[in-house]
Amino acid sequence: MNGAFFFLVTTIGMIRFEDFYTKLHIGSKCLTGGGISVLLGVICFKGLSLYSLKLSLIIVFLIISNPVTSHALARASYYSKSGSIAERSHLIRDDLKEKKHGGLL
Amino acid sequence: MIEIIIIVILLSALLTFYRVIKGPTVFDRIAAADSIGIMFLLILVLLSLYFQREIFIDVAIVYALLLFVDVLIMAKFFGH
């Protein structure tokens, strides 16, 4: 039930927030927390077996892959020319702006 | 109990699909599609618990791998 609550929070945030980086933030954190809590509940329900070994493999993969995809999306959206999200969003401090013309990507 | 959780996750995936249709930029749509993919992965795990079939877990592992590679390639492709 805890994981289902996390998924509802993710959906509400995904609809309500109008900035891109806040959407990416809630898509990264709440989704990982909801997935881990649902899978841990299923592991505690089934007990130790090969089944729970596969489920823990899914948990480890979710922990590794979700920050990597969020980082790749944020970096690609910052350096994209046509989108220009960084000028339209409500960024308070932008340290990466001096490095933008160095051609990092 | 499991049916309630599956219905709640399906409802949230349906509401997230609104963001895929009406996203202002491309990256909003990619992030929303990523979250819908993870929600369907967990629905697959819960369905394997509901139907007592252990073969669905292997499908879920392969689905997580393909989702990871998919989002990375889309971020690399739309970034330029």
Image: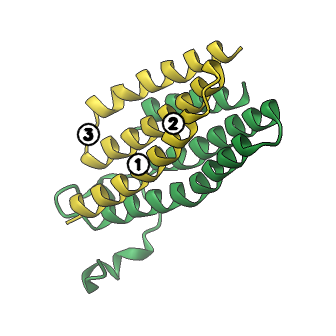
Chain colours: A green, B yellow
Report the quarter where the C terminus of chain B lies.
Answer: bottom left
Q: Is residue A5 rendered to the left or right of residue B29?
A: right
Secondary structure under tag 2 reads: helix
Residue highlighted by disc 1: B67
Q: Amino acid at mark 1?
A: Leu
* Chain for numbered disc 1: B
Residue highlighted by disc 3: B24
Secondary structure under tag 3 reads: loop
Hey, which quadrant is residue A101 in on the image? bottom left
Q: Which mark is residue B41?
A: 2
**Alpha-carbon distance for marks 3 and 1?**
23 Å
Q: Earlier in the sequence, mark 2 or mark 1?
A: 2
- Total marks shown come to 3
Secondary structure under tag 1 reads: helix
Q: Nearer the viewer, residue B38 or A22?
A: B38
Q: Residue at x 34, y 25 (%)?
A: B18
Q: Residue at x 64, y 33 (%)?
A: A6
**Alpha-carbon distance for marks 2 and 3?**
26 Å
Q: Amino acid at mark 3?
A: Pro
Q: Earlier in the sequence, mark 3 or mark 1?
A: 3
Label 1, residues with CA under 10 Å away: few <14, some 14-19, many ≥20: some
Q: Residue at x 52, y 50 (%)?
A: A25
Residue A61's place in the image compared with B57, above or below, is below
Q: Is residue A44 rendered to the left or right of residue B59?
A: right
Q: Determine contact: label 2, label 1, CB under 8 Å.
A: yes
